[in-house]
Amino acid sequence: MRRAFALVVVFDQFCGGARALRGGGRVLSKDIKMPDPVPAAGVEAAVACMESGRLFRYNVASAEESEVSRCEDAFAGYTGHRFALGLNSCGSAIFLMLKCAGAVHGDEVLTNGFTFTAVPSAIVHAGCEPVYVECTPGYVVDVVDLERKLDAHPDARFFVISHMRGKMASMDEIEAACARRGVALLEDAAHALGVLWKGEHSGHHGAAAAYSSQSYKMLNSGEGGFFCTDDDDLAARAMAYAGAYETLARKHARVPSGAALARAMDGSIPNFSLRMHEATAAMLTPQLLDVDDRRAAYNERYGAVAAALDALPGVTVPRQRPEVTIVGDSVQFNVDAATLPAAAAADALVARCERRGLPVERFGAPTNARNFATWKYARPPACGLPATAAVIGRAFDVRLPSAFDDEDLDIIVEIIADAVAAARADAGLDADSKAANGAIAAGAAAPARTAFAR
């Protein structure tokens, strides 16, 4: 059987294993929340840690014996930072960026109006007030609005920029805008491990950067994070806050200067006990070895899926800036207002996908933790963030797990295409208004069609 759907080719070999829903349409049978497995070397190292009983990072004679210290050294070597500090989460790393940069209770901190709730939560954890900057249809900070907010909040001394879903804004412009006003730039790079700016690793525009090893990131330890910097004083303060009390900082592979340590370890910095666990580090270090290879594999698949979705009528997949080398482990797309004239239509699109086994996140859904309207623990934005609200209301997010094969990805596109076509039919629009897209599966050959064929 050969079946083609809106502007996307489906091939004979893809029709064998997929379940079909009564009334037509294949169903995704795999779990899209599937994380990458820990490689065998990481499992073995973590088990060896547990068997030894030495699970506290400093319960060793030297840095060379510590899994966390070795992991920190490898992480810094990969990202190109002088220092990396392993922590229990990326949220802790964002919190420590602010504390180490000198934020105090009551400070205003600028950040993205579109990001994950952990970012403003870390700002609140530091005792500060978030001030939100509008996003563009490409999900990154609007530089014009950033300049406007910086000028409107002249006492704000910090900007935590979030590279949400690994997407980077005009970082050279942003760095310059902050420098002109004496504002410390700090980078939430939770999603940006492996993402490059002009060929160099992300996280080098700001004074410090925070990375994540939560399960849906390029490194998977369930929970975990890294604080990275090139500055001796910031590194020493972060170690003190994280729990390197007395002389324990000497058990790090990369040690800040003696003067920086003396300033940080004088008793003026509280110990928040945010350290990374030895078994966590043990499972992470082997994963650093193939980040570049996994990025290449992700990006090849992403390119095909993104092109297929972007060819659908009413759908746009925003392109990243030419300076950016992406990590395409998920795809985001916008649907136009003609196709989805109201929130109910957007929710119906999500429901149609869900019925066929595909969880699609709508960023602007009233329960989505990436929707600023759900961040009720902090002062709401005075302006209401109308540009961001308009973008996220029709912005959708789909993971592309590495374990999925070409057939799975083809089914994902098919389900979204059918849901969009149904939405356009509901809105009284033509289903077909873009040129046909090429194949998803490399090497497959079948003619594209520009209408549904059942």
Image (spheres, grey):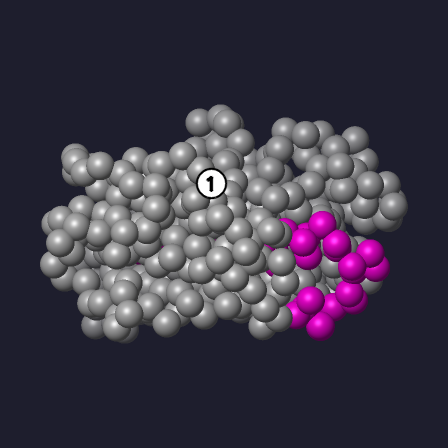
Q: In the displayed structure, does residue 391 sit left or right of residue 127?
A: left
Residue 328 position, x and y percent, is 39, 44
Answer above or below: position of 12 versus 126: above
Give whichever of 305, 186 is nearer the camera.
Answer: 305
Residue 297 position, x and y percent, is 27, 41
Q: From where the camera sits, is residue 24 visible?
A: yes
Residue at image mark 1: 433
Q: Quadrant of residue 28?
A: bottom left
What residue appears at the point 50 percent right and 68 percent down from the top-left corner? 348
What residue appears at the point 69 percent right and 41 percent down from the top-left corner? 142
Q: Quadrant of the N terminus?
A: bottom left
What residue appears at the point 68 percent right and 35 percent down from the top-left corner? 174
Answer above or below: position of 268 versus 307: below
Give whichever of 26, 197 is nearer the camera.
Answer: 26
Q: Label 1 crowding class (10 Å Cα cut-off): few <14, some 14-19, many 20+?
A: some
Give whichever of 408, 141 is nearer the camera.
Answer: 408
Q: Quadrant of residue 104?
A: bottom right
Q: Amino acid at mark 1?
A: Ser
Query: Which portion, as a residue range, is magenta?
Result: 373-401
Residue 417 position, x and y percent, is 39, 53
Residue 73 position, x and y percent, is 38, 45
- Reply yes or no: does residue 399 show up in magenta: yes
Q: Quadrant of the C terminus?
A: bottom left
Q: How many marks?
A: 1
Answer above or below: position of 272 versus 289: below
- Reply yes or no: does residue 48 show up in magenta: no
Disc 1 on helix, strand or loop?
loop
What residue appears at the point 75 percent right and 55 percent down from the top-left corner? 385
